[in-house]
Amino acid sequence: MTRRRGRRRRWVDWLSAMTVGFLLAALARLPERLSYALAGRAGILFWYGSSWRARIALANLAQALGPGADAARIRRIARKSFQSLMKVALDFARLPRVLRRDTLLERVDTTQLDERLAELAEAGEGELVFVSGHLGGIEVGGAVLAYRRRMVNVIARRVENPYLDAMARRGRQSRGLRIHPRRGGIKPLVKAVESGEDAALLIDQNQRKRGLFLPFFGRLASTDRSAAVLAMRRGVPRPVLVGFAIRQGPAFRFTMEFAPVIRPTQRELAERDLAGLTRRITAAMEEIILRHPEQYLWLHDRYKTRPPGEREEGGGSPG
């Protein structure tokens, strides 16, 4: 029975992946504004079809915007964030065409990124630790970094469906990202950084194990320490660049938006204060997220893992 069930699951996974791939490819061939309008409609359907995710998004937004936030505004932003998620999937499908035509930098304003890179080059600082999260065009941001820096090392969370996982991996590798599996932790990124290469991490999701409990929009959340580990590896300070590809308008137009360069302080290095550096990185992320809340992934169960003594919350988290 187990073998038969496993065979049936593989067929379901394959069929699901083929369906997703076909739909994205079909949308990518439509006129750009029409395809993104349809992706936005799909986001609205997702909003109404997943009341559980909608509740998580509303609760997270209420936490982030504070007790004085208007309920109607919270609901409006949450709905737009579901639309934004579907547009990110479409970005993934449209990127190959943009790269083939070599028009990526015509569609993405990289002024702030170029300013930060020039500042670091003038200071003689080499390998970088890029930090981002699930805001704006996640796939586009990774492609731009790889385009500008030739190659960037990243850790990718495995998609449960192995066919979708392979699809995502192939697409990202074709854009110059060197993908490392989450299993094995950050060891491959440590090796890459120590050999003079760049690393990029998404650190805004719930960390089930070995997380640092730090405030995220005013509430303790289990937070990934990897960026701080890389920035202070072997006592060598490395600059951290926190940034996102923010969508401009309804379709494939973006601006790379970055916080000021973050560097480990002498005290943080001497005391190996991972929490202190991670807290500063998280605060920089929060500031940019609050400028564009409708483009953030609020449906993720960010506060699921609780500190010792607090019961873990229900709801789960997306892969």
Image: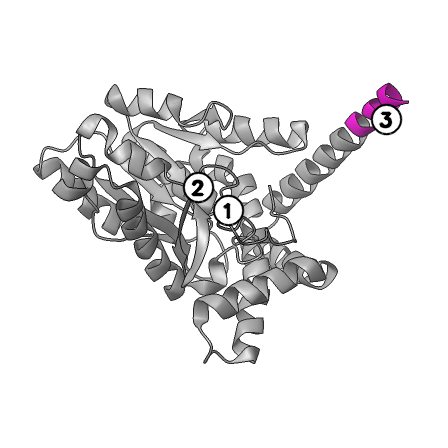
Local SS, label 1: loop
Q: What residue do we see at 51% from left, 25% from top?
A: 183
Identify the residue under disc 1: 206
Local SS, label 3: helix
The numbered mark, 1 or 3, whose residue comes first in the sequence reads 3
Q: Quadrant of residue 104?
A: top left
- Is the residue under label 3 in contact with that under label 2 (CB below 8 Å)? no
Q: Nearer the viewer, residue 34 or 262?
A: 262
- Is the residue under label 3 in contact with that under label 1 (CB below 8 Å)? no
Give, as a single range, the part of the protein colored magenta: 1-10
Image vertical order of residue 250 relative to residue 143, above or below: below
Q: What residue do we see at 28% from left, 25% from top?
A: 193
Indicate which label's residue lies in the foreground, 2 or 3: 2
Q: What residue do we see at 56% from left, 78% from top?
A: 71
User: How far across and down, in percent of the image, does residue 54 sit?
Assistant: 64, 62
- Is the residue under label 2 in contact with that under label 1 (CB below 8 Å)? yes
Disc 1 versus disc 3: distance between alpha carbons?
A: 31 Å
Q: How would you rate the neighbour count of disc 3 (Cα within 10 Å): few for under 14, some for 14-19, many for 20 or more?
A: few
Name the mark on residue 5.
3
Identify the residue under disc 2: 211
Disc 2 versus disc 3: distance between alpha carbons?
A: 35 Å
Local SS, label 2: loop
Residue type, label 2: Gly
